[in-house]
């Protein structure tokens, strides 16, 4: 604990008792960018500082920034545990996604965790967006964010098994394709759920930007995951490979048949439980 007795362009001078004098450089006065020390601290201010270096002659180099930094990581951990939605500003971009400042800490939101497709991440520069925190690692200085999870909470979309929705393929992977189906929700069309026929390469069937119809297999709201299917929409096994336009044309009809089968199976299961 010390009392500020002087402030200049270099920083603040602190009386910490006895013959020891402490100095807090301007860059260590706050987590925020500080141009002038007088903008954030003034003489006679009493504060708690943390010692970061012990200079010769008993002079201490201290910091307020380090204390604020520890508190900020603690707040982020709490916000993640509460599954809270936080606001953050996009301050930079790279090939993988967005660099976002939350609670004065820089975090990363991968492009796959955006609620909508963008032509370039640069479109979102300086925007204030909503995020959920998916990982906090103070030791590694790692903060991971998801705008998609926040959007799914702010604009909940409820799907039922067997619903047919239109979507846009946003990413093709060896194991399947991610499809944006509206409301900030993206689902996975697994390679095994594309067609009854065997598929070796997803990119031979689907491409980024394709508009398709898919059926909802399941929805995990807590984890923000939706499983999709086109296999059960095929009028004839293999149609997704031979004639996908036919699959989309008959999608609602085939989905209705699927729902009838599910309802019949559930009714039979209830009847069997009642007879036992």
Image: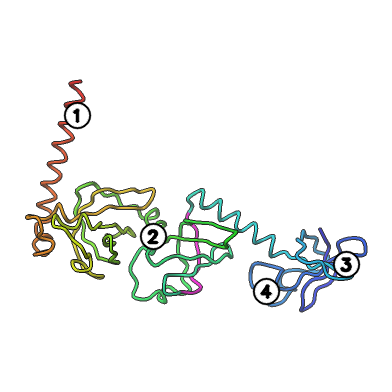
**Quadrant assignment for the C terminus:** top left
**Rendered residue at 79%/71% (across/down):** 12
Instruction: Provide the major secondary structure of the magenta segment.
Output: strand
x and y percentages locating residue 51 in the rendered image: 77, 62
Q: Dot 4: few (<14), some (14–19), or many (≥20) neighbours within 10 Å? A: some
**Contact flag, marks 2 and 3 (Cβ < 8 Å):** no
**Contact flag, marks 4 and 3 (Cβ < 8 Å):** no
Q: Earlier in the sequence, mark 4 or mark 3?
A: 4
Q: Kindly state the secondary structure of the residue where label 2 is placed.
A: helix
Q: Earlier in the sequence, mark 2 or mark 1?
A: 2
Q: Residues under labels 1 and 3: Cα distance?
A: 80 Å
Residue interval drawn in magenta: 85-93
Q: Residues under labels 2 and 1: Cα distance?
A: 37 Å
Q: Residues under labels 2 and 3: Cα distance?
A: 52 Å
Q: Dot 1: few (<14), some (14–19), or many (≥20) neighbours within 10 Å? A: few
Q: Nearer the viewer, mark 4 or mark 3?
A: 3
x and y percentages locating residue 271 in the rendered image: 16, 26
Mark 4, residue position: 34
Q: Earlier in the sequence, mark 1 or mark 3?
A: 3
**Contact flag, marks 1 and 3 (Cβ < 8 Å):** no
């Amino acid at each position: 604990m010390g009392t500020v007795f002087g402030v200049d362009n270099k920083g603040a001078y602190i009386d910490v008792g006895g013959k020891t004098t402490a100095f807090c450089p301007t860059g260590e006065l706050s987590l925020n960018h500080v141009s002038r020390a007088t903008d954030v601290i003034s003489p006679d201010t009493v504060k708690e500082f943390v010692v970061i270096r012990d200079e010769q002659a008993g002079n201490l180099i201290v910091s307020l920034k380090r204390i604020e930094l520890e508190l900020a990581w603690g707040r982020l951990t709490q916000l993640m545990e509460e599954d809270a939605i936080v606001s953050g500003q996009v301050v930079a971009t790279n090939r993988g996604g967005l660099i976002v400042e939350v609670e004065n800490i820089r975090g990363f939101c991968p492009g796959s965790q955006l609620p909508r497709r963008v032509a370039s991440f640069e479109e979102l520069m300086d925007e204030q967006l909503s995020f959920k925190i998916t990982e906090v690692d103070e030791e590694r200085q790692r903060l991971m964010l998801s705008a998609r999870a926040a959007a799914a909470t702010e604009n909940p979309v409820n799907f039922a098994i067997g619903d047919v929705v239109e979507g846009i393929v946003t990413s093709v992977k060896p194991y399947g394709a991610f499809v944006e189906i509206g409301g900030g929700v993206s689902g996975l069309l697994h390679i095994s759920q594309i067609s009854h026929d065997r598929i070796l390469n997803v990119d031979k069937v689907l491409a980024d930007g394709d508009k398709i119809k898919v059926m909802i297999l399941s929805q995990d709201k807590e984890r923000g995951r939706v499983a999709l299917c086109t296999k059960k929409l095929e009028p004839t096994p293999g149609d997704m490979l031979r004639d996908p336009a036919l699959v989309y044309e008959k999608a609602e009809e085939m989905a209705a048949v699927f729902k009838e089968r599910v309802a019949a199976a559930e009714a039979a299961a209830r009847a069997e439980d009642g007879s036992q």
